[in-house]
Image (cartoon, rainbow, N blue to C red):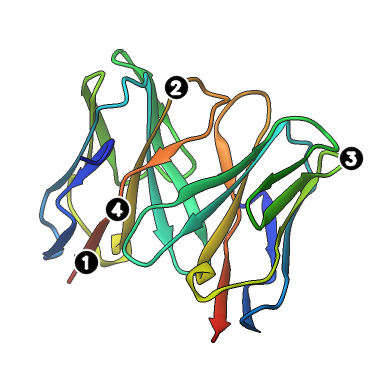
Amino acid sequence: GQQLNQSPQSMFIQEGEDVSMNCTSSSIFNTWLWYKQDPGEGPVLLIALYKAGELTSNGRLTAQFGITRKDSFLNISASIPSDVGIYFCAGQRNFNKFYFGSGTKLNVKP
Amino acid sequence: DADVTQTPRNRITKTGKRIMLECSQTKGHDRMYWYRQDPGLGLRLIYYSFDVKDINKGEISDGYSVSRQAQAKFSLSLESAIPNQTALYFCATSDLSDQPQHFGDGTRLSIL
């Protein structure tokens, strides 16, 4: 069953605001990924994290691998309308398959 | 050209019909995956394959079967479709099992 809890489920924000979302699990993961899905398309990888405590940026996006290895965070600074979409976290244990969160739907009002 | 191509992109069919969804990739990856996406449930793994002779069940394999015809091709079949299999289906590939997966653009399947 579902092993990752992703929150919030949806967000409505104003253009220019910062955004924060997270994923938590009761299990330890050794890899965390963040994806974005645009309507009518498949998820596209944003950031990959491989080490506890790791903080990685990709433009206005920053993600962190939690110290406990049971959580991860994604922040988007100064949001713009093209940030609209669904953001998914994914975690992997024991170099096996990935488990996906249920997604955070982001709406940005111009 | 897309690295991971799914066909068809959309399909509407009737209960009881047999359906095949196809996935091909030009990335040269050994590992291929089939996921199902439902609103509010994220992506759930149906089947995965680490090479041509390897097939593994995911968390929701009942009612589905797969075939890995070649390194570049991985197809998903619904032997007798039922309405609760209506969903968005994604194929993905990865180079190694701990590397990020690359997704196709999905197949929207509706079963009436």
Distance Cα–Cα, label 3 vs label 4? 34 Å
Q: Amino acid at mark 3?
A: Ile
Dot 3 falls on a residue whose secondary structure is loop
Q: Which residue is mark 1?
A: B110
Of all residues, the one furthest to the right in this rendering is A67
Q: Amino acid at mark 4?
A: Gly
Q: Which mark is residue B95?
A: 2
Q: Residue at 20% of width from left, 66% of height from top?
A: B111
Compare residues B83 and B49 and report the one nearer the observer: B49
Image side of residue B68 versus residue B45, left or right: left
- Please say if the residues under marks 2 and 3 sit with CB atoms less than 8 Å apart: no
Numbered circles on residues, count: 4
Q: Are marks 4 and 2 on the same chain?
A: yes
Would you place residue A52 above or below residue B28 in this image?
A: below
Chain of the residue that carries numbered disc 2 in the rendered image: B
Q: Which residue is mark 3?
A: A67
Q: Amino acid at mark 2?
A: Asp
Q: Which residue is mark 4?
A: B106
Dot 1 falls on a residue whose secondary structure is strand
Q: Are marks 2 and 3 on the same chain?
A: no
Q: Amino acid at mark 1?
A: Ser
Q: Quadrant of the N terminus of chain B?
A: top left
Would you place residue B25 above or below residue A109 in this image?
A: above
Compare residues A57 and A97 and report the one nearer the observer: A57
